[in-house]
């Protein structure tokens, strides 16, 4: 479920935290970094699950709304015919029937983060939209429409609601820092047609990759900076954004020490991360420096890549 780009982001954020700490022994730094990285990965996955839990609770609120409105002393015809179709949404039912989702919610005590007033507000906002009216008017269900409506709730009703996002920033630990990563994870979720294992969102292979990348960047800092500094030309190293330097070091380590990841993939990935997390000029800067150093390394026959099955 979690992508290598998500992992690269968490490694970058971990390195950023380490850079602000007092220098220490390398093994101690690596151990501290591993702990920070694991915490960041686990926290992000909790937030991802909370986002999905909110969507299911919003969908299920239709049943409570129907019950309350039909129970009025003098219910109107509209009150008597509130649609509960969204509560039986196929994807909602699949999520709620997922034993790993339920275990994750229970074990991490994630229900405590669900605010019923916000569930009600978003539901009431949703039912006024043309997308919702079109959804409940359809006579037959189809998987595409079921998923599209939940994606609409996430992207248009939740992400674009400034007050709700402010509430998340205040009440969900780490939401502000991890928001971009949650958006990527949710995008992957809606694109995926496979059954998600919420307990094992990070495979052993990807978790090992995360720690290997982190430790390699720490171990090879001096060598990487020897390659980077000559390419900065008129740039003062101290004036280059710290995130950009970290991305360059990570990219070089993937070039040199991760033979199954194609160099082109590495460059493209770090360009995209620079766009999301650094300055407006960073993507071009990271692209230019990495490409320049890669050409030098290739001339010196220092790049040895292997064919790899699967995505990098």
Image (cartoon, rainbow, N blue to C red):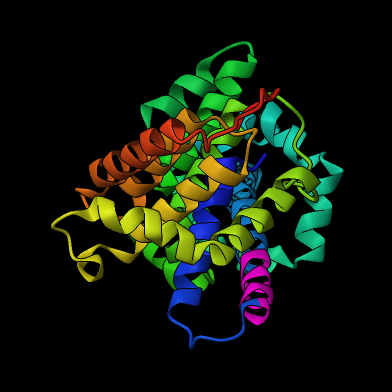
Q: Where is residue 267 shown, x and y percent of the image?
A: 42, 36
Looking at this view, is 251 or 181 the one in front? Answer: 251
* In the displayed structure image, the side of residue 172 where residue 98 appears, left or right: right
Position of 68 relative to 262 (above/below)? below
Write down the quadrant of residue 125 in the picture: top left
| Residue at (73% x, 26% y) in the render | 194
Q: Residue at x 30, y 59 (%)?
A: 229
Residue 25 or 280: which is nearer the viewer? 25
Q: Which residue is drawn at the image coordinates 60% and 58% (left, top)?
A: 216
Magenta-colored segment: predominant secondary structure: helix
Position of 126 relative to 104 (above/below): above
Task: Say if 103 sits above or below 296 in the image.
Answer: below
Is residue 25 in sight in this rendering? yes
In the drawing, does residue 213 fall left or right of residue 292? right
Q: Tell me residue 273's x, y (percent).
A: 40, 46
User: What residue is at 24 percent from the left and 41 percent from the top?
Assistant: 284
| Residue stretch rendered in magenta on the structure | 27-38
**Magenta region includes residue 50:** no
**Foreground residue among 187 and 143:** 187
Instruction: Let me know if residue 115 appears in the view.
Output: no
């Amino acid at each position: 479920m979690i992508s290598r780009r998500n992992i690269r982001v968490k490694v970058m954020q971990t390195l950023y935290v380490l850079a602000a700490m007092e220098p220490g022994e390398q093994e101690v730094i690596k151990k501290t970094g591993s702990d920070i990285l694991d915490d960041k990965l686990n926290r992000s996955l909790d937030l991802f699950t909370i986002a999905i839990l909110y969507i299911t609770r919003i969908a299920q609120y239709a049943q409570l709304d129907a019950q309350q409105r039909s129970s009025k002393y003098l219910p109107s015809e509209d009150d008597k015919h509130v649609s509960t179709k969204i509560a039986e949404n196929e994807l909602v039912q699949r999520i709620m029937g997922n034993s790993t989702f339920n275990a994750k919610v229970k074990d991490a005590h994630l229900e405590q983060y669900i605010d019923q007033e916000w569930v009600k507000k978003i539901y009431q906002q949703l039912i006024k939209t043309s997308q919702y009216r079109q959804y409940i008017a359809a006579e037959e269900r189809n998987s595409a429409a079921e998923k599209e409506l939940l994606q609409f709730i996430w992207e248009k009703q939740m992400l674009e609601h400034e007050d709700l996002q402010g509430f998340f920033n205040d009440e969900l630990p780490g939401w502000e820092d991890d928001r971009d990563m949650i958006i990527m994870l949710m995008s992957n979720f809606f694109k995926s047609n496979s059954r998600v294992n919420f307990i094992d969102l990070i495979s052993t292979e990807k978790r090992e990759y995360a720690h290997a990348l982190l430790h390699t960047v720490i171990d090879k800092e001096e060598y990487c900076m020897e390659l980077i500094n000559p390419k900065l030309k008129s740039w003062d190293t101290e004036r280059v954004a710290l995130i950009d330097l970290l991305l360059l070091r990570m990219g070089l380590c993937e070039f040199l020490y991760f033979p199954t990841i194609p160099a082109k993939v590495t460059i493209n990935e770090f360009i995209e991360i620079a766009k999301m997390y650094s300055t407006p000029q960073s993507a071009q800067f990271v692209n230019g420096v990495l490409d320049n150093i890669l050409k030098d390394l290739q001339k010196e026959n220092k790049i040895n890549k292997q064919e790899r099955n699967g995505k990098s």
